[in-house]
Image (spheres, rainbow, N blue to C red):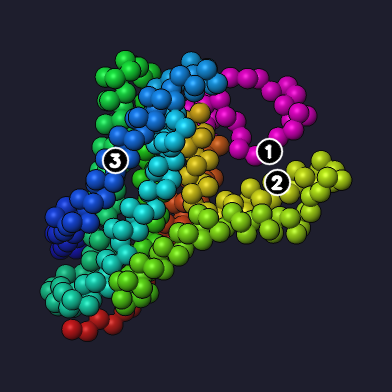
Amino acid sequence: MKNSSLGVLYRKELADHFHSKRFFIILLLVAITGLSSIIAAAYGMRDAIENEGSNFVFLKLFTASSGSVPSFVSFMSFLGPITGLALGFDAINNEINKGTLSRLLAQPIPRDSVINGKFLAGLSVLSIMVLSLGIAIGSIGIISFGIPPSLEELMRILVFLIVTILYMSLWLAVSQMFSLFFRQSATSALACIALWLFLSVFAELLAGVIADLVYPVSEYSVLDNALKNANMKLMLNRISPSTLYNECSVYLLKPTVRTTNFVTEIDLIGAVAGALPLTQSILLLWPHFITMAAITMICFAVSYICFMSKEIRA
């Protein structure tokens, strides 16, 4: 009974997404993103090959950029949160205000099937968007540039797309949580945008201020103090999901990168230049992946508990 109810509600929520104007607006933005990233790759591919070498050329479709158009990774770092927030900021409170949720819960269905179905439907929409966009960019790259991907590159792109889906689902979970905290959809939307702006913009500024207070840097500072300042700033920046996502993207799409921390010439002694295998790159990004997954599960758990205990009246 529970599984059948969840399936029905999942299909209902999925149909609501696909028939909404919001979905088509987001889809249009995603399509423009894909086209723009291909244009950026076309203009920036030669410079990227000259600067980074001719290895893993296919991956440069996702990382190359021109002077004015960002890369696909940069687009998704910015557009991913907006997409996730847009799909969930009114998931619950909008139905409460319309009175449809009380009628739905009056039916003989488990209460948790509603919140589970909403999240799974939103996650499915995000997955379809990301995977379709990744396949489209790869196909256009093969046709336009004649660049055949290797198995290593295909696996790296697949893992990157999975990380992108997780990054967007984190913001979906946050927006659904806020849709339970606030009764009005406009209020929950503003709260989502405020949190996104703080973590994406102001957190970096705040990290710099805190690092400068703890480890002041001047022209007379020793190298050790400057390194501590830089590393503390980097660690504080990692409270932002966008920083975690960007570092995961670097590890996956630039196989020669072994760390995003600051290093000195002493650290480079004995280091062997070359690309890391995929398994080693995954080990580097694993803490970031687990952190984003944990935040997603915590936000969904809070939403689940609040929804199960919330009194909903007609």
Secondary structure of the residue carrying tag 2 is helix
Secondary structure of the residue carrying tag 1 is loop
Which residue position is annotated with label 3? 32
> Can residue 156 be spotted in the picture?
no
Farthest front residue? 68
Which residue position is annotated with label 1? 262
| Residue 214 % position (x, y) | 76, 58
Q: For this view, does 308 lie left or right of residue 202?
A: left
- Whichever of callouts 3 and 1 sits on the residue coming sooner in the sequence is 3
Of badges 3 and 2, the one in the foreground is 3
Q: Nearer the viewer, residue 213 or 288?
A: 213
Q: Nearer the viewer, residue 40 or 310?
A: 40
Distance between the Cα atoms at labels 3 and 2?
36 Å
| Residue 201 % position (x, y) | 53, 55
Which residue position is annotated with label 2? 230
Q: Residue at x 34, y 30 (%)?
A: 38
Total number of numbered discs in the rendering: 3
Q: Residues within 10 Å of mark 2 (few under 14, many from 20)?
A: some
Is 84 magenta? The answer is no
Q: For this view, does 182 lie left or right of residue 244?
A: left
Q: Quadrant of residue 86?
A: bottom left
Q: Nearer the viewer, residue 102 or 232?
A: 232
> Can residue 126 be spotted in the picture?
yes
Q: Establish if 274 lies above or below 312.
A: above
- Whichever of callouts 2 and 1 sits on the residue coming sooner in the sequence is 2
Distance between the Cα atoms at labels 3 and 1?
35 Å
The amino acid beneath tag 3 is: Ile
Of badges 3 and 1, the one in the foreground is 3
Distance between the Cα atoms at labels 2 and 1?
7 Å
Q: Quadrant of residue 152?
A: top left
Is 282 magenta? The answer is yes
Q: Residue at x 35, y 67 (%)?
A: 189
